[in-house]
């Protein structure tokens, strides 16, 4: 999200960039089209993510459907991540909904099944807290069939044990 110089990223040797396709119910990120077009035109693979504001499984499923529609504007196949974070939980709380581990897991499954069924690559975005307290990664992988884990942990090193089960380690939100 924001203004990203995709050419600079490509020229620095990076092969893939994560960009926010949108959030909540059918809200396309204001920079998505420009960022996606730049990735597409410059041959940089994208990992899309959808920031969830779902309050139930049906809403999460619908977010998945819309995320796929956005991806299809540029790619027939790419990774699409379900991103449920503290803002999601706070938004739900303000709307009288308590998101616990079972609910977060069920919403992730609903979203990611839509992604996989449409031929895209399902990814769960998570961090140490959410991996422990909000997502049952094993159940998600079993019910979706296959899921990649995008693990956000802003530190210069993590243990080998912490790396196990994570496919992508995001160590910063800068650069």
Image (spheres, helix red, strand yellow):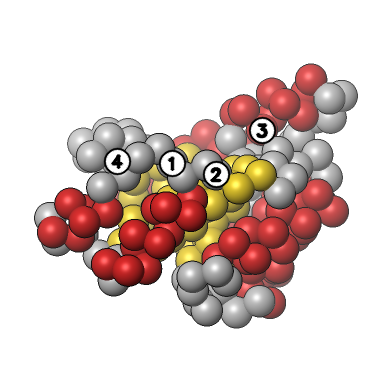
Q: CA distance from mark 2 to mark 1?
A: 7 Å
Q: What residue is at 66 percent from the left and 33 percent from the top?
A: 88
Q: Earlier in the sequence, mark 3 or mark 1?
A: 1
Which image quarter holds the N terminus? Answer: top left
142, 18: nearer the viewer: 18
Q: Is residue 64 visible?
A: no
Left or right: 29 in relation to 94: left
Q: Residues within 10 Å of mark 4 (few under 14, many from 20)?
A: some
In this picture, is 122 found above or below 85? below
Q: What residue is at 76 percent from the left and 34 percent from the top?
A: 99
Task: Report the disc number at residue 88.
Answer: 3
Q: Earlier in the sequence, mark 2 or mark 3?
A: 2
Q: Secondary structure at mark 1?
A: loop
Q: Is residue 32 visible?
A: yes
Disc 4 vs disc 2: Cβ atoms closer than 8 Å? no
Task: Report the disc number at residue 1.
Answer: 1
Q: Residues within 10 Å of mark 1 (few under 14, many from 20)?
A: few
Q: Residues within 10 Å of mark 3 (few under 14, many from 20)?
A: some
Whole-percent x, y for residue 36 in the image: 43, 59
In this picture, is 6 found above or below 23? below
Q: Which quarter of the figure has residue 45?
A: bottom left
Whole-percent x, y for residue 165 in the image: 43, 59
Which tag is nearer the camera, tag 4 or tag 1?
1
Which tag is nearer the camera, tag 3 or tag 1?
1
Q: Secondary structure at mark 2?
A: loop
Which tag is nearer the camera, tag 2 or tag 3?
2
Which image quarter holds the C terminus? Answer: top left
Q: CA distance from mark 4 to mark 3?
A: 21 Å
Which tag is nearer the camera, tag 4 or tag 3?
3
Q: Earlier in the sequence, mark 4 or mark 3?
A: 3
Residue behind mark 4:
171
């Amino acid at each position: 999200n924001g203004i990203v110089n995709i050419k600079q990223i490509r020229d620095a040797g990076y092969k893939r960039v994560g960009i926010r396709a949108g959030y909540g119910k059918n809200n396309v990120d204001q920079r998505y089209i420009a960022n996606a077009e730049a990735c597409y035109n410059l041959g940089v693979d994208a990992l899309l993510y959808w920031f969830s504001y779902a309050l139930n499984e049906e809403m999460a499923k619908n977010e998945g459907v819309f995320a796929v529609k956005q991806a299809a504007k540029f790619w027939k196949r790419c990774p699409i991540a379900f991103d449920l974070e503290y803002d999601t939980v706070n938004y739900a709380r303000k709307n009288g909904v308590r998101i616990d581990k079972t609910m977060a897991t069920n919403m992730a499954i609903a979203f990611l099944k839509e992604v996989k069924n449409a031929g895209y690559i399902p990814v769960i975005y998570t961090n140490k807290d959410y991996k422990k307290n909000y997502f049952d990664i094993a159940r998600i992988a079993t019910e979706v069939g296959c899921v990649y884990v995008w693990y956000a942990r802003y530190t210069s090193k993590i243990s080998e044990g912490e790396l196990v089960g994570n496919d992508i380690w995001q160590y910063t939100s800068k650069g």
